[in-house]
C-alpha cells in the first residue's frame, strides 16, 4: 500500500538537531525500502482549471502560508496503521504542525 504524507505550514528554518534527527529518520526509511520519494514544494505553483473544454492557468500562491502544502513523502507500507505510525514519528521530530496521510491508488492496485 502506498501513502502520500503531506505537511502544511510556513517554511520556518529548522535547527541543526532537528535536521540531524530527520536525516537519520529518512535514511532509516530509505534503507528499509519504505520511502519512495520525498521533497519540498514551491510555495506558489500554478493552478490548472478545466471547464467546458477550456483550460485556464493561474499563477499562485493561492492559500495562506499555513494552509499550503510545503512538503511530501511517498511511502510504501503494509498497512494504513504503519503509514500513520511513520507520520507520528515525523511529527515527533518536527514538532507542531498539520498534515495529511492519504492512500495512493494506481494501476498496480487493481484486482488481477
Image (tube, grey):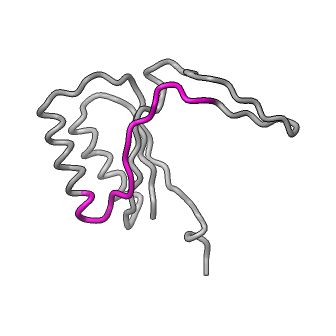
> Quarter holding the C terminus?
bottom right
Total marks drawn?
Answer: 0
Among all residues in the image, which is located at the extreme right? 52
Residue 99 position in % (x across, y down): 41, 36
Residue 73 position in % (x across, y down): 38, 48
Among all residues in the image, which is located at the extreme bottom? 112
User: Is 60 in the magenta?
Assistant: no
Residue visible at 27% across and 43% down in the picture: 90
Image quadrant where residue 72 sits: top left
Among all residues in the image, which is located at the extreme left? 17
Query: Is residue 80 shown above or below 65?
Result: below
Among all residues in the image, which is located at the extreme top? 64
User: Is 42 in the magenta?
Assistant: yes
Residue visible at 14% across and 40% down in the picture: 20
Residue visible at 28% across and 38% down in the picture: 91
Residue 56 versus residue 109: which sits nearer the camera? 56
Residue 110 position in % (x across, y down): 61, 72
Query: Viewed as shown, does residue 43 lie left or right of 31?
Result: right
Query: Viewed as shown, does residue 105 lie left or right of 78?
Result: right
Residue visible at 33% across and 57% down in the picture: 35
> Quarter holding the N terminus?
bottom left
Query: Is residue 22 shown above or below 110?
Result: above
Provide the residue span drawn in magenta.
Answer: 29-46
Amino acid at each position: 500500500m502506498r501513502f502520500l504524507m503531506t505537511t502544511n505550514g510556513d517554511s520556518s528554518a529548522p535547527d541543526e538537531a532537528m535536521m540531524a534527527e530527520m536525516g537519520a529518520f529518512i535514511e532509516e526509511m530509505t534503507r528499509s525500502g519504505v520511502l519512495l520519494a520525498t521533497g519540498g514544494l514551491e510555495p506558489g505553483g500554478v493552478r490548472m482549471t478545466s471547464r467546458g473544454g477550456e483550460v485556464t492557468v493561474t499563477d499562485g500562491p493561492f492559500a495562506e502560508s499555513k494552509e499550503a502544502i510545503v512538503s511530501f513523502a511517498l511511502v510504501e507500507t503494509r498497512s494504513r496503521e504503519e503509514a500513520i505510525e511513520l507520520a507520528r514519528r515525523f511529527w515527533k521530530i518536527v514538532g507542531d504542525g498539520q498534515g495529511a496521510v492519504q492512500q495512493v491508488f494506481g494501476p498496480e492496485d487493481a484486482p488481477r
